Image (cartoon, rainbow, N blue to C red):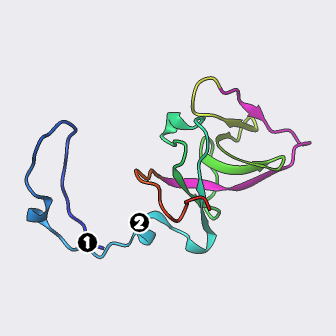
């Protein structure tokens, strides 16, 4: 993959061609985004409850099952048969949204709860990828 370093600000009507400072780096998106390939999967975010941490509806989530969960990590979990993306409160056993208007969800010992992994990266696609296009 080739890397072209350039800076662009909104509202600028023109700027020097980024090709003027062209560099070729040994950069792989896999290496940049995935730390543990055999323990990583990709999901799609749905809804608006995580916008406070920069995760928007339709964003691609890189989820790592190998990473040790820490308090307030963004995680993907299965709660009573439903996959959710939330902040985890390990001290009070709660799942928290990152946007106002969403109540914390307490995870009791009666719930079916599985932690599926930590969201280590999120990617926003500005054009819909054919990979995720609905049939």
Question: 53 left or right of 64?
Answer: left
> Residue furthest toward the right?
110
The quadrant of the rendering that contains the N terminus is: bottom left
- Specify few, some or many for label 1: CA neighbours under 10 Å numbering under 14, 14-19, or 20 or more: few
Q: Are marks 2 and 1 in contact (CB under 8 Å)?
A: no
Alpha carbon of mark 2 to alpha carbon of mark 1: how far? 13 Å
Which residue is tagged 2? 32
Q: Does residue 77 sit above or below 51 in this rendering?
A: below
Q: Does residue 135 sit above or below 13 in this rendering?
A: below
Instruction: Identify the mark nearer the N-term, 2 or 1.
Output: 1
Q: Secondary structure at mark 2?
A: helix
The quadrant of the rendering that contains the C terminus is: bottom right
Question: 96 left or right of 50?
Answer: right
Measured as percent of width and height from the top left, residue 122 is found at 49, 52
On whether residue 83 falls in the magenta region, the answer is no
Question: 33 left or right of 16?
Answer: right
Residue 2, disc:
1
Q: Which residues are magenta?
A: 102-122
Q: Secondary structure at mark 1?
A: loop
Q: Does residue 106 sit above or below 16 in this rendering?
A: above
Question: 26 left or right of 64?
Answer: left
Q: Nearer the viewer, residue 74 or 12?
A: 12
| Residue at image point 50% right, 66% down | 34
Q: Quadrant of residue 105?
A: top right
Numbered circles on residues, count: 2
Measured as percent of width and height from the top left, residue 18 is found at 14, 59
- Specify few, some or many for label 2: CA neighbours under 10 Å numbering under 14, 14-19, or 20 or more: few
Measured as percent of width and height from the top left, residue 110 is found at 92, 42
Q: Nearer the viewer, residue 121 or 44?
A: 44
């Amino acid at each position: 993959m080739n890397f072209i370093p350039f800076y662009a600000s909104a509202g600028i009507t023109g700027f020097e061609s980024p090709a003027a400072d062209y560099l070729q780096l040994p950069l792989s998106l896999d290496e940049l985004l995935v730390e543990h390939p055999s323990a990583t999967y990709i999901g799609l975010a749905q809804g608006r409850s995580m916008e406070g941490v920069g995760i928007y509806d339709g964003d691609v989530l890189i989820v790592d099952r190998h990473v040790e969960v820490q308090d307030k990590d963004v995680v993907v979990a299965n709660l009573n048969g439903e996959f959710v993306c939330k902040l985890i409160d390990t001290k009070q056993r709660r799942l928290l949204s990152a946007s106002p208007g969403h109540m914390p969800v307490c995870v009791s010992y009666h719930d079916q709860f599985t932690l599926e992994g930590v969201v280590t990266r999120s990617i926003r696609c500005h054009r819909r990828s054919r990979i995720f296009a609905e049939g």
